[in-house]
Amino acid sequence: MYRSPQLYARLRADMDADNATDALAAVWRHAYRGGVWRPCISNNTNGLPESNGYIYIEANGGLNQQRTSICNAVAVAGFLNATLVIPNFHYHSIWRDPSKFSDIYDEDYFIERLKNDVRVIDKVPEFIMERFGHNLSNAFNFKIKAWSPIQFYEDIVLPKLIEERLIRISPFANRLSFDAPPAVQRLRCLANFEALKFSKPITTISNTLISRMREKSAENNGKYVAVHLRFEEDMVAFSCCVFDGGDNEKKELDAAREKGWRGKFTRPGRVIRPGAIRMNGKCPLTPLEVGLMLRGMGFNNNTAIYLASGRIYKAEKNMSPLLEMFPLLQTKETLALDEELAPFKVV
């Protein structure tokens, strides 16, 4: 059962009275004794052998899943000595985001940074497309199980790649096991921490938001807490958790599940146990719970918070306690002008 509102009611008076700053000073300290984390990705100077063919993947899911898919695609392509075609972002009815790779990331930099480790091209060559009638859907498509080991790609995918010269893998979210040899992990890290750099428009607006947040947190020497609050309707619905909205909440979220994942949650034999899901810690944190966690960590109500999120589910109700705990909370909408955000909004 969701009891966080009752907990907040009991703790609120004590939280309002206790706004000491000594705990906050400790929170801001860097915990790593070595000082700074440093990358340990070595550069490859051995050159690349002849390519075994072209891999085209569809990165599905949200932005984080797409990022993971890109890193996994780089690792798989490098391991198979294949040429990676710039990944395609699968359009989803929930997010309705038509962005391409180059809208989110610096495509030229991505290709250049990986050139000594993995061949990456922006599109399938014409002579290959001719073989498939200029239609990528005619290329052989692998349906790969989630968290497949890298050995599967060598044993099953590589022979087909050599035979066909072009293969598709769709969907590709979570299609590579985390348990992989160091050479594969190195390519993942290279893609994630070195090759993926945001596009110039995103970098520009990001720097603007950071600058304005530092101004808003001048009393804390420009320090602030950034929170990615994942409590939009799609996440709440997908979790199958029960909160405190009663029958109306159930009807709304049942409808959202059917709209976004038609039949996934209602197929015969599927049993959903919201209580067990909550007991297993798999429910998304509500804005209230995020506030309680931050206060418990020692952040007082003078802490500036940058909240990154989409449209919060039942925002007027659910955001109220978080704003009570942290009145200096900002979002991109409060920091930026409408015309600055307009290029990033889905029409």
Image (spheres, rainbow, N blue to C red):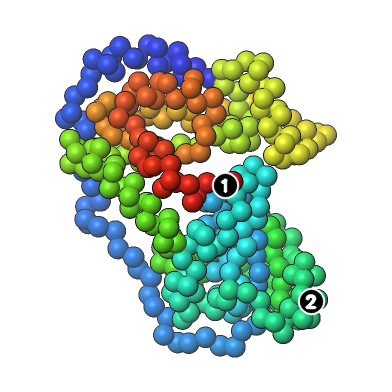
What residue sits right under mark 1 in the picture?
346
What residue sits right under mark 2 in the picture?
132
Q: Nearer the viewer, residue 220 or 216?
A: 216
The mark found on residue 220 in the picture is: none
Q: Which amino acid, by three-letter code, is at mark 1? A: Val
Q: x%, y% of residue 236? A: 58, 32
Question: Mark 1 vs mark 2: which is more N-terminal?
Answer: 2
Alpha carbon separation for disc pair 1 and 2: 33 Å
Q: Quadrant of residue 295?
A: top left
Disc 2 is placed on an element classified as loop
Q: What residue is drawn where x is 80% and y is 70%?
A: 138
Disc 1 is placed on an element classified as loop
Q: Is residue 7 left or right of residue 208?
A: right
Q: x%, y% of residue 114? A: 47, 75
Q: Nearer the viewer, residue 272 or 313?
A: 313
Q: Nearer the viewer, residue 204 or 54?
A: 204
In which quadrant is the N terminus drawn? top right
Q: What residue is drawn where x is 56% and y is 17%?
A: 244
Q: Is residue 24 left or right of residue 265?
A: left
Q: Residue furthest front?
A: 339
